[in-house]
Image (tube, coloured by chain):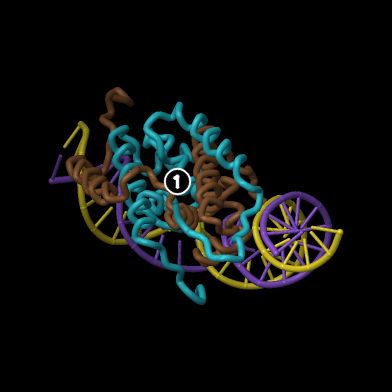
Chain colours: A brown, B cyan, C yellow, D purple
Amino acid sequence: MPAIPRTYSRATMDALKLLGAQIRLARKQRLMSEADLAARIGISRGTMQSIEKGSAKVEIGLAFEAAVLVGVPLFLQDSAGVTAAIERVEDKLALLPQSVRRPLSGVKDDF
Amino acid sequence: MPAIPRTYSRATMDALKLLGAQIRLARKQRLMSEADLAARIGISRGTMQSIEKGSAKVEIGLAFEAAVLVGVPLFLQDSAGVTAAIERVEDKLALLPQSVRRPLSGVKDDF
DNA sequence: CCTTTATGCCCGTTATATTAGCCATTTCAT
DNA sequence: ATGAAATGGCTAATATAACGGGCATAAAGG
């Protein structure tokens, strides 16, 4: 057992729950059983259940695969905009210093 | 080694990459080091790096925590709408049969 | 009604993510 | 310039997620 059973913020758990519920809904709309979807992804039915239950301890890649496979949008509504969004973020990233570093004097922590 | 090194769809990897880049960007904007953010979440720096790298094999809960902590929006722009969205999805879910079942005859698979 | 299937849940085993720690390198503040 | 800190990448050890499999219940369709 973990010394401390790790906690998650409300926002995280809400997001997980939402994602899981969306997947479950979309799956049923497509008339797939848990076993069907699990097989498509290449995971066990148990893991599929964890995903739909909104468990925090599943591989993010598996959860995303499930979402993609049943048509639940990730982050952006249009999947076309994702690559563009990646570039945009990475452009901004390029403008920042490679390593962050607080000046020794006090700074404003937020913007 | 895994018998089969598991593959992920393009859409999934793009979403992962975007999430990671957004977290990295937001972290730097807040002048936090990898170690800072990792400590806040309660994870190792190595895992933090995996998250920002967009690895598919991190716990989804940890990745989401990182996003939340630096202010990267999950799925919806307004965090207020999340709970409402959950209810909406679960309402729809309630209207569907508890267990899906294909009629024996051919059905339209999509809507 | 009765049969078939989907779902919920549990357990032991196995695969693997996470960790702490370390070192090299880069990079920024002074 | 130079020193302190951030980042990148690696390792062995440990924690734990994912699996297979099984069983019970619910529920849909015939």
Q: Is residue A2 left or right of residue D26?
A: left
Residue in the image at 34% along x and 60% along y: B10
Instruction: Say above or below: C3 vs A91.
Output: below
* B58 versus A15 height, above or below: below
Query: Which chain is disc 1 placed on?
Result: B
Looking at the image, which residue is at 63% across and 43% down? A5
How far across and how far down the image is residue C9, in percent?
A: 74, 52
Q: Residues within 10 Å of mark 1 (few under 14, many from 20)?
A: many
User: Along the line of sight, which residue is nearer the eye, A101 or A42?
Assistant: A42
**Mark 1: secondary structure:** helix
- Please tell me which residue lies in front, D19 or A82: A82
Residue designated by label 1:
B63
Please give the name of the residue rendered at 19% of the width and 45% of the height, measured from the top-left corner.
Answer: A91
Amino acid under disc 1: Ala
Q: Residue B77 appears at what percent x and percent y?
A: 37, 32
- Number of labelled discs? 1
**Lateral position of residue A87 relative to residue A18, left or right:** left
From the top left corner, tell me how far across and down residue D5 is, in percent. 32, 40
